[in-house]
Amino acid sequence: MHPVLVEVGKNSRNVMGNFCNLKILVAQINTIVGDIEKNTKKIIRGIEKAKKINADFVIFPELTIPGYIPLDIILRQGFIEKNQQAILEILPHTKGINAIIGYIDTKDDKAHINAYDPSSLAYLSNRKIFNTAAFIENGKIKGKYYKQYPPSFDIYDEKRFFAPGKETPIFSYKGMKFSINICEDIWIDGGPAEEAAKKGADTIFNLSASPFFPGKLEIRKRMIKDKAKMHRLNIVYTNLIGAQDGIVFEGGSFAVDNTGKIIWQAPSFQEDYLLIPSESANAEITYERIPALFNAIILGLKDYFIKNGFNKTVIGISGGIDSAIILTLAVYAFGKENVMGIMMPSEITSEENKRDAVKLLNNLGVKFYNVSISELYEIYKKNLSPHLKNIENTITGQNLQARIRGNILMAFSNTMNALVLATGNKSEIAMGYNTLYGDTVGALAPIADVYKTDVYLLGRYINKIMGNIIPENIFIKPPTAELKKGQRDEDDLPPYRILDKILRLIFEENKSIDEIVEAGFDKKLVTDILRKIRRNEYKRNQLPPVIKVSEKSFGYGRRIPITNHYIK
């Protein structure tokens, strides 16, 4: 996409000082963790774009060169050196322009030797490691900023790798006095932003890798506006775009003048290079929750597949809402030619569900296969009957069906070099209403962070933008796992409209039983839900990677011991 040039309006000059006289290109780019060569080439292209439009500055996101975040790859011998060498390769391309680029830097420090972790070569080589932003002016590194508050919460574990910086340097260019900070630093009250203001800075450039959940962008903007007003600072916030192992970074970079007004905002969920500031009075962009959820999942799907070298997927299709959503999302993300649907009916499968599945597959134009599991299930029962009596109408018999289906999906996956997408939603997974090694088979779980009630809303939105592709009957029939005759989800679970409200209070708000009861829910029901959540933690620890679209998703952002007895 070409850079968009917007001239600064006269009405902005009285509040922005010399900042308004500069052209600043924000490079909201999608990087790949560990692909230093490709990331470096993309940075150089961004610099060249900035030079072509005579920009003064080009700003990149946090850890641009190594990608965010390499985790224990950081400890591999040679990785940090390769990332440092990349900065030197970039320097000649910055002749005639300024650039601020994220990378990993080091300082010699014999006192930092970590004798307790012999695998950590980076630490054992007498160095401190820093999450760094380099300020490059006309081909030379003029200064560095080391992140002062490496976070250690939710998905973050930066303290495992990075030492905290101590300094807040101030730089000057054409009358603008500016400072740099990185992601978490801007959130800290009394932190680097306040220090920069006290030292006379009028502008801050923040390099971020801040993950998505609905409403997070508005939280960021509200916080930055408050900081700008409080300290009379212009703030340019450059956020990473892209997904890494299910963590979605939506971009949405923006700039705020020193009155707290948004003067420019980049779109979310797309890579772009845009020049700021803007004279538009309507520069601020807002997003509705369900469309944002849809865009985040699509970005998570695309990046997981593309960055791992895949473009085809296999999905088990049941005629229910969850597999319908996954199928339509996959077609939207990859095109129908790269999606295969596998119907796996049994003697229990209703004609209604078969019709709905076929109608959906035909609506989408997806190639599909019909593989009955009835004969396979009978063989299992026959061979197990000498050892396990009367399994047909038990949980064992139900789980066998799901696991047979999982094996079939993996056979197609292996043969066709296509990844399986797991179809479980957050509500069912929370309650353990999913079969381990059956429903959990897959390389990625796209809606495992989406509650069942939101799955239906997502489906309605998909029909709105794709033309009623999901048959109406899929929305209105009672949901069922269909592993025994007449089975309905609500035979085993509370109604989703109630269950999801309670689950949100548990996962997103960490409420206790008493607090949830005070909110109007039955104590016995709440206690039973918490017991089931605790009892099924071992299943969630074996899930595929989950696309994170809430404040607290299943995965490495949620660290609950499998062995624990606390439910209060």
Image: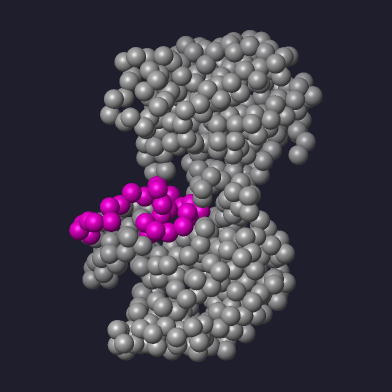
How far from the left and from the top, in percent, is residue 540? 38, 59
Q: Quadrant of residue 272?
A: top right
For the residue pair 109 and 478, the one nearer the viewer reads as: 109
Q: Is residue 263 visible?
A: no
- The kind of secondary structure the magenta stretch mainly shows is loop
Q: Is residue 245 visible?
A: yes
How far from the left and from the top, in percent, is residue 344? 55, 79
Q: Residue at x 29, y 84 (%)?
A: 387
For the residue pair 78 and 425, the one nearer the viewer reads as: 78
How far from the left and from the top, in percent, is residue 378? 45, 88
138 inside magenta stretch: no
Q: Vertical placement of 292 versus 95: above or below?
A: below
Query: Which residues make up the magenta segment?
Result: 540-568
Q: Quadrant of the C terminus?
A: bottom left
How far from the left and from the top, in percent, is residue 135? 58, 17
Q: Residue at x 52, y 16 (%)?
A: 144
Q: Vertical placement of 424 versus 310: above or below?
A: below
Structure colour scheme: one colour
How many tags in the picture?
0
For the residue pair 202 and 116, the one nearer the viewer reads as: 116
Q: Residue at x 59, y 13 (%)?
A: 141
Q: Quadrant of residue 527?
A: bottom left
Tell which residue pokes out farthest to the right in this image: 52
Q: Is residue 362 left or right of residue 74?
A: right
Q: Quadrant of residue 9?
A: top right
Q: Residue at x 59, y 39 (%)?
A: 32
Q: Quadrant of the N terminus?
A: top right
